[in-house]
Structures are given as C-alpha cells and as structure tokens.
Amino acid sequence: MTRPTDEAPLPERLARAITLGGPIPVSQFMAAANAHYYATRDPLGAAGDFTTAPEISQMFGELIGLWAADLWDRAGRPADALWVELGPGRGTLTADALRAMRAAGFLPPVHFVETSPVLRAEQAKRVADAVWHDDVEDLPSDRPLIIIANEFFDALPIRQLVRAANGWHERLVACQDVLFLPIAGKQVPDSVIPEGLRDAAPGAIIETSPASVGIMRVLAARIVAQGGALLAIDYGYQGPAIGDTLQAVRGHAFANPFDEPGERDLTAHVDFATLGLVGHASGAIASGPIDQGDLLRALGIDARAAALAQKDPRVLADRDRLVEDMGTLFKALAIRHPDWPQPAGFA
C-alpha cells in the first residue's frame, strides 16, 4: 500500500514538488529541510548532531544572564521586563541565566519562540513556567523585551545568487531520482547586488537572508516601541561579502547540505552588518558586532572559570573552547532602545 502524499518522507515530497513545478530556490529547500529536522528530533549533545555554547558550559548562560541583569539594572529596573529567547534549544541557556539573574535580583517572566514539539518538551523540563510562541509577532506588545538569539539566525533560510558569464542568477535546487543538486536559475538584475560585488568573477556566490531581515525588523521595531534590547550571538561576518557558507552537520561532522533533506542541520553564516543596519533603520541603536571571546572576557568568564575550576579543573578547557576555539568565529551584536544604556561588553 502506498502512503498518502502528506505522509511521504520529506525527500520524496520535495522531489515530487520539483518534478511538478520545477527547481526551487535554495531558501525554500533550506526552510523545508530545517522545519522537518527540528520538528522531529533533539539535535543537541553527544548523541545528536552538534553542540552549542550553553551545552558546553554553564558559564555561557550564567554570563548572558548577568549581561541581561546588568542592563536591566542600569535601565532603571523596569518591573514588567520580559526575558525572551529565540530558538532556545533544550532551554539550557535560559535555565543557567535565570540562576545568575536571580542572584542579581532580576526574575523576569520567560517567553520562548519555538515551533518544535520535541524541543518544547525538553525546554519545559528546565523552565517549566515558560510561555511558548510560534512566531516573534506573537510576543507581548506592552512591555520591555530582553531578547536572546544564540545560534538562531544561522538556521534561517538564505538566498544564494551566483555569478555566471552573462550576469547574476538565483541559485536553485533541482532533483533527479531524489538526488538534489544546486543549479543556476533565472537571471536577477544587477540592482539587487551590492555595488562593490557586481563585477565578481564567474562562480562567485552572494548570500542574503530575507527571513533574517524580516525578523530583525519586527524585533527592532518592538524594542523601539516597548523598550529593551536584543543580543544575537552566532557565527558570521561583516557583509556584504562573496562566499558560499551553506553547510550541513550530522553526527558532529560536516556533510553535503543537499543530501537527505530533513535529516541534517542546515546553516549559513550570519551577515551581522546587515542585521545591524536593519536595527538602525528601525530606530534602534546597534552595537557591534564584536567577537564572542571578547564579550565573554568582558563579562568575567576568566574569573568565573577560575572559581569553578577549584572543584573541577575541566572547566578551564570549556573556557578555552568558548573563548579561543569559538571566540573569533562567533560574533555578538546588540540592538537596544535609544534610551537604554550601552550593554556591557560593547564599550
């Protein structure tokens, strides 16, 4: 018996859609693959596909919590401020941050933006009284928001534009016998390409993320209207730039991003310059980006690691991983209300 169409595996459904309608943009392929991937598993930890900073050490979440508490304190301690985390994984960062914020006298209600039922169940184990939302548009609109986005923007869909001999083309995903491969699609006007990059050599690729821009625009407008700040931490660069950063990870190893859609994590490097410009255009103040290592040092990770290492010396290796190994690849960007103070670490 053949399964109904809506119960077919994702590769079969994508192959059918491409066969009937033609090749699809990389952004559509990435969105479908990641939606299925995150909805059907917990991808974190040794048994999963990758490990994020909060899962490496409690120090990461604690320091982000102290960052938020310090900002809240210097903003006048607004009693109705909310803690918001976008894509909170297992809830580990927030759980560690709440412990640190409590010691500083800040105990905000917690709101999570998360669509995965599997990850929501994990988050509920660590932050039982959280409020969940499917979309940033659903966040409360009447109080200050302190928003944390750690490794969130990298998983949002990207467009890829590839330079050919006759100009720039949208990169599409074609399919042959359930094998997916990228191809150059219809030509796009030069006006969509940043001026300094329009004459790049054939084969050059430029990435944009309309989804990231849209979400940042919404959040920055909320911060300007309601008060608060956003801290985004991710691997990325100051764009615009040439380069193909689309990648897949499975079992803690890099994999072909076009193989087995829905069975591996697809990400791309974050263009922090564009996100900062979007925040600025919305009336917010953008600070950074700065290196993750510099931020954690400024927040006191060395002193915290030394204290914890008295009981467990392995903490020092965790500190090195966060500050040295990930310290320059990962960047941090802050977006804040014009009347809120400069966040710690961004002087």
Image: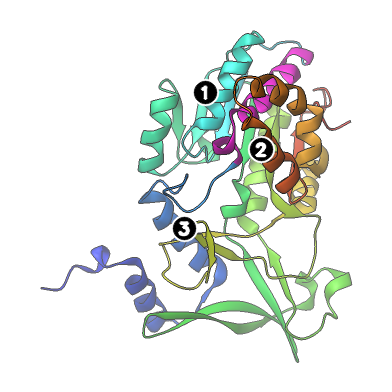
* Quadrant of the snapshot with the C terminus: top right
**Start-end of magenta stretch:** 53-74
Q: Which residue is mark 3?
A: 251
- Specify the label residue 90 is tagged with: none
Which residue does the image show at 71% across and 39% down from the upper left? 320
Which residue does the image show at 58% across and 38% down from the upper left? 56
Question: Which residue is nearer to you in this view: 71 or 191?
Answer: 71
Q: Which residue is mark 2?
A: 317
Q: Which residue is mark 1?
A: 110
* Quadrant of the snapshot with the N terminus: bottom left
Which residue does the image show at 71% across and 10% down from the upper left? 77
> Dot 1: within a 10 Å radius of its alpha carbon, few (fewer than 14), some, or many (20 or more) residues?
some
| Displayed quadrant of residue 300 | top right
Q: CA distance from mark 2 to mark 1?
A: 31 Å
State the residue lying farthest toward the left: 1
Q: CA distance from mark 3 to mark 1?
A: 31 Å
